[in-house]
């Protein structure tokens, strides 16, 4: 049980990221000093949104150059910090070798950040951004859980480097963090496991996977229909709140599923259609599983992933986050509409008539 001194700086890795931006906003608005790690502190364009927040907030922000794959890269940024938020995650859209492009960087990055924690005596707590992907590999896995619902007690044991490699990378990275944490007694580890994150970003030009998916719902890419994918959904602002609560509540411990509702693609599309009507070519039907399975390779998906996920309910229990972190989740209707409206306001759909 750790009390964090709010007069000390707080470190956030991957500061320009989707979730990190909202965490930093909350910290700055609470008057804290944020040590924000970025790949290139000289790239003022990528930092302008954080700078704008800092300009009107009581807190302050200091940027540090850091590379996830470099040992010792976080030592300078971590100096004097009692609390570290590790949100940075290696991302590449060109996966040629899953072990090399996803798994190794996720593991190395986690080990490098926690290596700096080990060398920095002031650190009392690390809040790690993991994922529900470290809990559930495929939706079919839920059939084997009590009542068909996953809790923090479950671990993803079905993903491998050859099947659901991203989920596997999140799993092994979180497991490595717990191993490192348990080998010492100075600092706590508290883990946040979000489901599918949606909602407006600090920066409107987000490159998150959720941005791409919701954009495709409105730009005609999915007008013929969507697969019967069951997912958990949570607002990015609530994910940030969960991180802050996990950081400063002394009694916070363990893993936390952060998910507002168990939903699916067609439900999200129907919410948008109800709000915006015929202004956008939203998907209006669910595609047959066999068709999705047949066309999967052409769409960049493996057929095994389709077979083990489409048509199966994906369910998680968020009770621990409500009980122990005090989470109050925004309705999914608010999150998806706010997200889509930000895209409209940013002219993402400028080629379409609204």
Image (cartoon, rainbow, N blue to C red):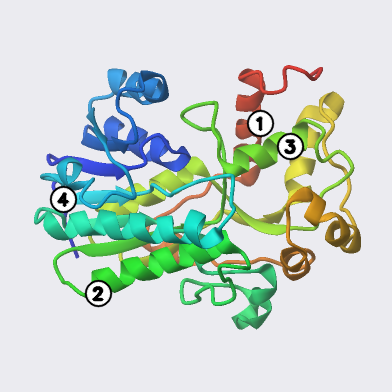
At mark 1, the secondary structure is: helix
The crowd level at tag 3 (other Cα within 10 Å; few <14, some 14-19, many 20+) is some
Which of the two labelled residues, at mark 4 and mark 3, occupies the earlier sequence position?
4
Q: Is residue 319 above or below residue 347?
A: below
Measure the alpha-carbon separation of dots 4 and 3. Answer: 41 Å
Which of the two labelled residues, at mark 2 and mark 1, occupies the earlier sequence position?
2
Residue identified by numbered label 3: 216
**Percent position (x, y) of residue 118?**
16, 60
Measure the alpha-carbon separation of dots 2 and 3. Answer: 42 Å
Residue identified by numbered label 1: 340
Query: Which is in the foreground here, disc 4 or disc 3?
Result: 3
Residue identified by numbered label 4: 82
At mark 3, the secondary structure is: helix
Which of the two labelled residues, at mark 2 and mark 4, occupies the earlier sequence position?
4
**Percent position (x, y) of residue 35?**
23, 37
Measure the alpha-carbon separation of dots 4 and 1. Answer: 37 Å
At mark 2, the secondary structure is: helix
Question: Is 343 left or right of 240, judged from the image as shown?
Answer: right
Q: Which residue is drawn at 75% across and 40% down?
A: 271
Which of the two labelled residues, at mark 4 and mark 1, occupies the earlier sequence position?
4
């Amino acid at each position: 049980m750790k009390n964090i001194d709010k007069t000390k700086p707080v470190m956030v890795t991957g500061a320009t990221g989707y979730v990190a931006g909202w965490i930093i906003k909350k910290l700055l608005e609470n008057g804290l000093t944020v040590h924000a790690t970025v790949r290139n502190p000289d790239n003022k364009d990528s930092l302008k949104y954080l700078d704008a927040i800092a300009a009107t907030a009581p807190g302050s922000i200091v940027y540090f150059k850091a590379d996830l794959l470099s040992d010792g890269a976080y030592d300078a940024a971590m100096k004097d910090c009692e609390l570290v938020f590790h949100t940075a995650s290696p991302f590449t859209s060109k996966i040629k070798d899953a072990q090399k492009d996803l798994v190794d960087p996720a593991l190395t990055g986690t080990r490098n950040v926690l290596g700096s924690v080990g060398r920095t005596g002031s650190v009392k707590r690390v809040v790690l951004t993991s994922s529900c992907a470290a809990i559930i590999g495929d939706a079919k896995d839920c059939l084997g859980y009590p009542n068909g619902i996953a809790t923090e007690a479950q671990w993803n044991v079905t993903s491998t480097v050859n099947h659901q490699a991203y989920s596997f990378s999140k799993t092994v990275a979180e497991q490595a963090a717990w191993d490192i944490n348990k080998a010492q007694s100075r600092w706590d580890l508290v883990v946040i496991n979000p489901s599918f994150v949606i909602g407006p970003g600090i920066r409107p030009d987000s490159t998150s996977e959720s941005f791409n998916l919701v954009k495709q719902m409105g730009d005609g890419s999915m007008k013929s229909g969507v697969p019967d994918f069951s997912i958990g959904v949570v607002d990015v602002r609530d994910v940030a709140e969960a991180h802050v609560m996990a950081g400063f509540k002394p009694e916070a411990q363990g893993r936390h599923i952060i998910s507002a509702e168990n939903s699916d693609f067609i439900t999200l599309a129907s919410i948008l259609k109800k709000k915006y009507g015929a202004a956008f070519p939203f998907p209006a039907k669910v595609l047959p599983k066999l068709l999705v399975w047949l066309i999967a390779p052409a769409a960049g998906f493996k057929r095994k992933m389709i077979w083990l996920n489409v048509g199966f309910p994906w369910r998680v229990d968020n009770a621990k986050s409500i009980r122990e972190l005090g989470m109050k989740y925004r309705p999914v209707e608010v999150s998806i509409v706010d997200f889509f409206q930000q895209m409209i306001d940013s002219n993402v759909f400028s080629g379409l008539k609204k």
